[in-house]
Image (cartoon, rainbow, N blue to C red):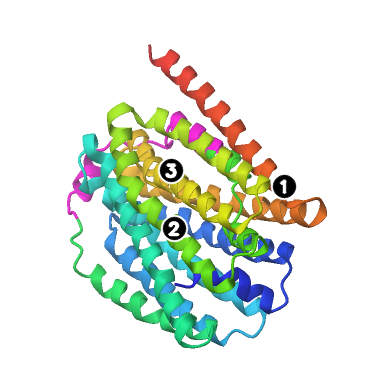
Amino acid sequence: MIYPLVPGFLRSLGATNTLVGVIEGIAEATASLVKSVFGWFSDRVKRRKPFVIAGYALSAVSKPLLAAAGRWGVVLGLRFTERTGKGIRTPARDALLSQSVSERRRGLGFGFHRAMDSLGAACGPLLAMLILYLTDNNVRLVFLSSVVPALIAVSLIFFVRELRTLKDMVAQAKKTGSLGRDFIWFAGIMVVFTLGNSSNAFLLLRAQDAGVAQGMVPLLWVVYSLVGSLTSPLFGALSDRIGRRWTIFGTFFVYSAVYFLFGRFSTSSAMWLLFAGYGLYLGSSQGTFRAFIADLVPAERRATAYGLFETLIGLALLPASLLFGFLWDTFSVQVAFNVGAGFSLVAASLFLFTQIISRHQRS
């Protein structure tokens, strides 16, 4: 409900494009440090569900407080708190999911999870638009209303059943101090990619500058999320069928093409098509990346792996958002998007190189 409205809300409080990048980058990067800590902690205590409950609850409490924010500094603090909740829950949640799906259907399982996440992200902006329409664009009321679905989500977690086999797996597993070379390579490549994958807030600002009315911005997010929701299970199943590596390799090229076109076209009609294209990137990436990590790391170490992965990505978001905002303000929006597309092509080349080396060493 609230995410598509935050960039415009920050601008109304006096924030520049660069400052929006600073706020989004700090919120994501600083809170991401929590992910590696609580991922390791989840593996340590051999529990998943308590971390999921605590993380969703913290996010549920912080979101509606945006309604009282009068300065951008308050928004920064609340965004940090909400992202911290995500940091607490995400590694344990992904590890729990990886243990709940068979290995041969892992891509589809993660794809279905991301589809449900994206479907919620599509329905939320529709609710926001309805509230904006009925209340003469009262953005603060949208923020306040977000507490209702948030609390419903928290209550549903109590019905989730945690598998009790993890303790036995850890007891029988050989103790290792490393997550594996292939995982380290993939995490490093994703850091390179993320340097060109700045906050999505810039895409929303780009749409507004292209002539999309503020009241229609949430609908753009619906298009993006709905396309991601519909395609995520398809790409997940495709990764089960043809291999995760080829799906990931193609994802880098999809992202590069979409970002290049965001810099090239500046009409409101083009924004609708580009957000749909960006939804293809969403559908092909999030679930497949998580399934690939589960392929590389044993079950008893996955929360640690997911936490470290998310931390590295979050830390890279800070310089990525700063760089994008700086390039936009100093040079042009075209330069900013072209640089983002270039980082994705570099990541694709590195990924192909490491996979060739890995296959050669195994043969």
Q: How many marks?
A: 3
Res. 44 in view: no
**At label 1, which amino acid type do we have?**
Gln
Q: Which residue is mark 2?
A: 223
Dot 1 or dot 3, earlier in sequence: 3
- Asked if disc 3 and disc 2 are in contact, CB closer than 8 Å, the reply is no
- Asked if disc 1 and disc 3 are in contact, CB closer than 8 Å, the reply is no
**At label 3, which amino acid type do we have?**
Ser
**Residue lying farthest right?**
330
Q: Position of residue 276 (x, y in %)?
A: 47, 51
> Which residue shows up at 28% across the image and 50% down it?
112
Q: Is residue 21 above or below residue 106?
A: below
Q: Is residue 264 above or below residue 34?
A: above
Question: Considering the numbered disc 1 on the image, is that residue within a helix, a strand or a loop?
Answer: helix
- Whole-angstrom CA distance, mark 1 to mark 3, is 24 Å
Res. 252 in view: yes
Q: Point out the image quarter for the C terminus.
A: top left
Mark in the foreground, 1 or 3: 1
Q: Position of residue 235 (x, y in %)?
A: 34, 39
**At label 2, which amino acid type do we have?**
Val
Dot 3 or dot 2, earlier in sequence: 2
Range of residues picked out in magenta: 163-189
Q: Which residue is mark 3?
A: 285
